Image: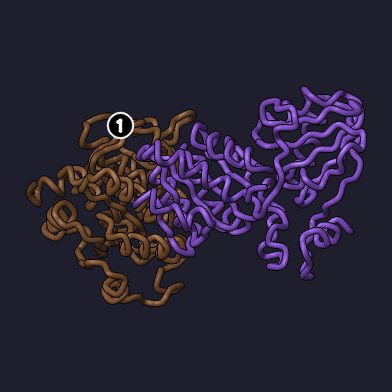
Chain colours: A brown, B purple
Amino acid sequence: MDETSFKRATKSVRRKVITAISKSRKGHIGGALSSVDVLYYLFKEQIVQISQVGKNTARPLVMSKGHSAIAVLAVVDDLKNSDSLDFYNSNGSYLGNNPSELVEGIEFHTGSLGHGPGLGAGVALAKKFEEEDNAVCILMSDGELNEGSVWEAFQFISKHRLNVSILIDNNNQICEDYLDAVSPEMDFESIFGGLGYEYCELDGHLLTDLQNLHPWILERQAPRVCCLKTIKGKGVSFMENVLKWHHGIPDETMFKQAMEELK
Amino acid sequence: MTDLRDAFFEAFIELSAANKKIVLLSIDMGSQVIKSKSHLLGERYINVGVSEQNAVSLAAGLASQGFIPFVYGISSFLVNRPRAQIRHDAIIANNNINLIGSGPGLAYDLDGPSHHCLDDIQLMRSLPGIKIYSPFDAETAALAVQYSVDSNCSTYCRLDKGTYPPRSKSLINIRDLYIKPGDPENWIVSSGVVAHKIEEDDGRSEMVVLGVTESTGSQIADVIPDNATISVNEEAHISGGILSLIAEANLLQNKKWTFAGVKFKNKFVQEKWPRDKLFELYCDG
């Protein structure tokens, strides 16, 4: 994958995200756009696998930040060259704001924040029992670090040396505020290093940085945390780092401008 | 007389030896049998520490990969603290997990209302599809393990502490219910070890509810005649327990039951007393 094709593809995925949400008038654009690049890279390189309904994959993704599931759905849609998002949020569809394991590409049901690390730890523990050495990948938001349950899971994963890769989408925004307005600034390297994790920090939008994830996820075994520095609303100038776009819906003019910028 | 926990975990260890998919996650909770025999489970027994939320999510993750996880902790904490994890990771996602709540009702009498668990049936019954077991002797404790392993849903077992004499074999078993026939128009219904508080031979018919599911109300309605008087004896707040279940059945099954001897109120008692005295205080409005 080169930079040009990566940019072309991730722009296409972003257009799908914004189109689906604009059409259905419901969804979370900002956090989806901040995680599109890493999700596209992970699925395209088959570092994580696209699940089929009712079947487990060897290299699963736990989408802990469930409200950004549209990004997963759009990536899968793009890679499979399908039109599945036509049914996003439509009556009777399983394709909704939060991920249902009843659709292709979503292996685990999430939507309530703070559950992914514990759930992923259980999956990794099962793989350890079965002597499978594939990593379980968990994508969580930095806002989920407010949830106490994730710290319970972090301790367990470290103590049992589970083959888990935790990716933190560090866009520094929650719904109503910037994260650093409600939480202390955290020195992730010290915190996770102190908990026994290998730690790295990458630009979550830069292909050359994301390419480090290939060996980091597939070849390492120790519990590890990667902080992905990202921008909420990435790719659309008027959405970037603006709180409104956590779940704002663009009007027709804004939609057209977003599509123009993502050409 | 056998300690209910020992009976439960003896059966558990036996089943686990035959089924390598069974995993026990203890929330820093022991028992005599666990202490002496957990090594037989090898790595499938883990003390996860004081972390109810993580224990339930872990169990759901294990279940998603085909394992049969049991989570063992103190009832009051197990049903309250990780309820979101039970709801989202297990029930909504169809990951079948088995919860073992040690010390339901007033079992932890002297530990105070933080440990009194009078809302577990209420909380678990509000989750669609979960099955609740309230064993009341060694035999039903062992059955609860077997039923949980065999079930195709999540389960919650109200595992009491202490030794109790056998009772179930002297009762007639109809699905989830145990019956002692007496006056068909007068019934006393109980659940769990409260069944041992019922006075012998007072002439009434007796029913002990072992399992609670969405169909339990109709099971009860199939047994108790339309115009009967029912007294419920349980350690539970007035809302949501067995009494509520029967009152719902009265409405939904078009019965004309009369209720007598309603005891527990919705309150917490701070005073430290042994279980029997606490029972009275919780009943005294």
The picture places residue B109, in percent across and down from the top left corner, at 72, 63
B199 relative to A37, above or below: above
Q: Secondary structure at mark 1?
A: loop
Query: Which residue corresponds to the image point at 30% horizontal and 43% vertical from the top-left?
Result: A72
Q: Which residue is mark 1?
A: A52
Label 1 resides on the chain identified as: A
Identify which residue is drawn at 11% across, 45% down. Answer: A5
Residue in the image at 70% along x and 27% along y: B173
| Along the viewing direction, whichever of A127 and B272 lies nearer the viewer | B272
- Tell me the quarter of the image containing the C terminus of chain B: bottom right
- Residue at (83, 24) in percent of width and height: B254
Vertical side of B242 occupied by B176: above or below: above
Q: Position of residue B206 (x, y in %)?
A: 82, 34
Badge 1: residue crowd in 10 Å (few <14, some 14–19, many ≥20): some
| The quarter of the displayed image where residue A22 is located | top left
User: Along the horizontal axis of the image, is A6 left or right of B262?
Assistant: left
Horizontal placement of A156 versus B189: left or right?
left
Residue A35 placement (x, y as % from top left): 29, 53
Q: Nearer the viewer, residue A32 or B185?
A: B185
Position of B197 with respect to A123 (left or right) is right
Image-quadrant location for residue B265: bottom right
| Tag 1: amino acid | Gln
Inspect this view and state whether residue A220 appears: yes
- Does any portion of residue A254 appear in the rendered image? no
